[in-house]
Image (cartoon, coloured by chain):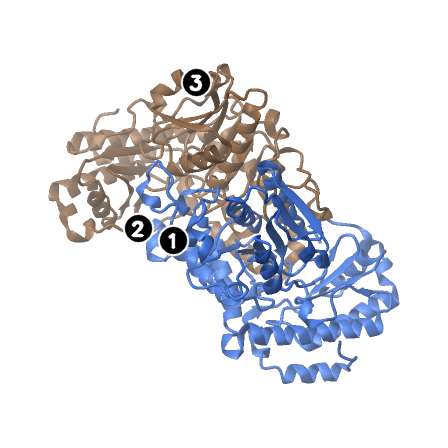
Chain colours: A blue, B brown
């Protein structure tokens, strides 16, 4: 980690930051330092007008003709291609549809069936104990339904647990609570050596860190549209399948939009060739249009160095914030890895007792992070719209909250359903 | 059917129509007679402002606090309750989430498991041969996965096929191609007599015809948000489970929002009590907000007699249109039932050769219906925003298209992907 710096130095870093103009793409509420882009990305400036155009013109005026005329039918592939550029997927290999959980159900079903074909002894889904719960729930449901065993382990135990019984290694690339990032290429290689397939959840990776799905020879991937992709609350999710697997399995959510010829209305299912068979119901047009605006804010960084440049800035931001906090807030324990290579685009801190009220006190000061049970203060750093001075100010506010003990105020100690 | 009338008589019917003011709730493109509300409902006047509020205020300004403050977390149940009022579901019994196809997967999984528990000989899913394809595809996928047999039959054959091997009778209440409506109460009773459960798809019923899920003692129901509910392109769908079944099964799309305590982030799945366990991923907020505006346009009819009054007008509209067409277009065959009790809110006509170009020629005249392969001209009648004179004019245009043979023009004979 870097040393502690003065606020002026942070301002100087901003003045020298070639990515600084990207911030202009967003509507940022005044007085807010938003460190929760890993929960809900902020609103791009283009989204409101684009959604309005879809509602009033494409839907209101052009009605059903927009399925062709406005390209509504193409949205799942078109937005998928754009996200694909951020995570190393080839054109035509990714679609956007449904939720992350639903897409995980599709690809994990596929991975289990393909892995077990001819190898019935492969009965284990291997994952990380602190994987995001919805991933574990979906795996648990599929394991119960289909007679697999879900084995959970710590990150460092994973390579040693890959063996001839492993059907699928299912991991979230960047851990939602700690920000710890797996080595996708190395773990995928290890899984393949053991004869297993990999399913990668990119919820905290897409738009946050460089990902190279094809380069890593990953098998399946899914991810979220409303975090670093800035797609809006509950935005649809994406799904990618390596071309070598894509036509080998009929995923069980065999809805009409994944059919080879949906408008022939034939009674028997015949899956589309390629990734389109991972579609199911009618495309969610409003949400897809909003998500496309969010993804475009990341593609705007391509002339400035793209994900590599964003990663460079993200690491500088998290280093700065972590160093300031460690120097000034001894009560907090850094949970995220110090090693750049292991850290996603977030900084997580732990406090056994007061993590929740400290986060609430920060929110009251306009510094929005979030609490993750049982003891984590989580701060996401989105290099698209965060400045170095924001990281500095956030650390300063955190120090003040702790020193002043304002976290003791009763209103910061009442838990809401969602934080 | 009624006799042919003069245009002035249609205008007189509109003048006497107590539901006429409901039309003011919608943005209708000038010069258009929209008979495709069964494919994509028109835009309610309130939707654009509401969606804009969600985008700019709730998302853009209030960000993650809106999960609580703006009630985003409550949207699936809140909108579900409103739709429930239209189809005879009790409060707290319905949620809105995912697509119709995905929801069918959930409830058919549940129905198969519950039906077969203790009765392993129940291995048949019985459905209608001309059911909407996506329903048959989902059933086919589940049947293959879980060792069931999908048996398809004509409507009149269904009661005789219910027996001790039947696990589930899965039907779409109103047929998408013909508009033929099943007697939900009678078929549900017959299924129960045979020891089977029922799954009803209300895609062409919700907001179109009166439905009484509880009165009919139905077991499971799903339906579409973007047809008669006016929720916008690709709006999320609804799912209902009879309270006696709702806690008996863990549906396989066991995502975190269906968990008993999603924000405890515990690794083991524990389903929520009640219909919330049929949720899966994060609620699609933009789409849910738009759908709520659409549903509200139907609830606005409650003081005027609600679904019973809308049904009365719908039948009068379809009777008028069918009578005019039969009297003036001998080349077309009426496919929808003449019997009011058997007819949904649409009129379908068949022509062996020219159904497609005739529909295109009508669209060019501003009369928007749709073609359904291989030979159907389909016209949906939405009593919320259609006038009697629209029905009269549409029939008149159809007569003119046939008499003038303008359907022969080359541009009407080129098929698009979606019509």
Is disc 1 surrounded by few (<14), some (14 to 19) or many (20+) residues within 10 Å?
some
According to the picture, the residue beneath numbered tag 1 turns out to be A73
Instruction: Name the spot of residue A385 as percent of width and height, x first.
Output: 61, 71
Work out whether A249 lies above or below B351. below
**Residue found at the very far top of the displayed protein:** B193
What is the chain letter for disc 1?
A
**Residue found at the very far left of the displayed protein:** B404
Relative depth, front residue between A121 and B418: A121
Could you tell me if the residues under marks 1 and 2 are in contact, i.e. CB atoms within 8 Å?
yes
User: Mark 3: which secondary structure?
Assistant: loop
User: Mark 1: which secondary structure?
Assistant: helix
- To which quarter of the image does residue B331 belong? top left
Real-space Cα separation, disc 3 to disc 1, in angstroms: 39 Å
Which label was assigned to residue B162? 3
Residues indicated by labels 3 and 1 sit on the same polypeptide chain: no
What is the chain letter for disc 3?
B
Residues indicated by labels 2 and 3 sit on the same polypeptide chain: yes
> Does residue A144 appear to the left or right of A269 in the view shown?
right
Relative depth, front residue between A360 and B26: A360
- Disc number lying in front (3 or 1): 3
Residue at 17% in and 43% down: B401
- Disc number lying in front (2 or 3): 3
Work out whether B9 lies above or below B52. above
What is the chain letter for disc 2?
B
Residue at 47% in and 46% down: B235
User: Mark 2: which secondary structure?
Assistant: loop
Which label was assigned to residue B142? none
Instruction: Name the spot of residue A409 as percent of width and height, x first.
Output: 85, 57
According to the picture, the residue beneath numbered tag 2 turns out to be B417
Q: Is residue B79 visible?
A: yes
- To which quarter of the image does residue A408 belong? bottom right
> Does residue B384 appear to the left or right of B264 in the view shown?
left
């Amino acid at each position: 980690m870097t040393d502690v710096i003065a606020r002026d130095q942070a301002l100087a870093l901003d003045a020298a930051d070639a990515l600084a103009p990207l911030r202009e793409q967003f509507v940022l509420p005044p007085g807010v330092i938003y460190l929760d882009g890993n929960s809900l990305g902020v609103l791009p400036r283009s989204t409101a007008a684009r959604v309005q155009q879809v509602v009033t013109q494409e839907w209101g005026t052009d009605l059903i003709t927009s399925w062709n005329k406005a390209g509504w039918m193409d949205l799942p592939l078109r937005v998928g291609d754009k996200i694909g550029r951020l995570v190393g997927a080839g054109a035509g290999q990714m679609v956007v549809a449904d939720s992350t959980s639903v897409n995980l159900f599709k690809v994990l079903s596929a991975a289990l069936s393909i892995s077990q074909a001819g190898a019935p002894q492969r009965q284990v889904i291997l994952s990380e104990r602190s994987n995001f719960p919805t991933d574990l729930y979906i795996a648990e449901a599929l394991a119960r339904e289909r007679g697999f065993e879900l084995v959970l382990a710590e990150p460092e135990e994973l390579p040693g647990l890959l063996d001839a019984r492993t059907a699928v290694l299912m991991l979230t690339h960047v851990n939602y609570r700690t920000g710890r990032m797996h080595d996708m290429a190395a773990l995928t290689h290890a899984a393949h050596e053991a004869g297993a397939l990999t399913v990668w959840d990119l919820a905290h990776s897409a738009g946050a860190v460089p990902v190279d799905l094809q380069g890593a020879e990953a098998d399946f991937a899914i991810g979220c549209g409303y975090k670093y992709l800035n797609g809006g609350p509950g935005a649809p999710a994406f799904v990618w399948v390596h071309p070598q697997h894509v036509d080998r399995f009929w995923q069980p959510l065999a809805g009409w939009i994944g059919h080879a010829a949906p408008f022939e209305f034939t009674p028997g299912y015949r899956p589309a060739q390629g990734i389109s068979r991972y579609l199911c119901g009618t495309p969610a047009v409003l949400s897809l249009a909003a998500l496309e605006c969010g993804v475009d804010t990341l593609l705007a960084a391509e002339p400035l160095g793209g994900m590599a440049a964003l990663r460079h800035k993200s690491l500088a931001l998290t280093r700065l914030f972590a160093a300031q906090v460690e120097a000034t807030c001894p009560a907090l324990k850094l949970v995220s890895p110090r090693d750049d290579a292991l850290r996603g685009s977030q900084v997580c801190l732990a406090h056994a007792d007061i993590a929740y009220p400290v986060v609430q006190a920060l929110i009251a000061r306009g510094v929005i992070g979030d609490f993750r049970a049982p003891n984590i203060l989580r701060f996401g750093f989105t290099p698209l719209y965060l400045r170095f001075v924001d990281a500095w100010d956030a650390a300063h506010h955190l120090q003040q909250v702790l020193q002043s003990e304002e976290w003791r105020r009763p209103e910061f100690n009442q838990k809401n359903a969602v934080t």
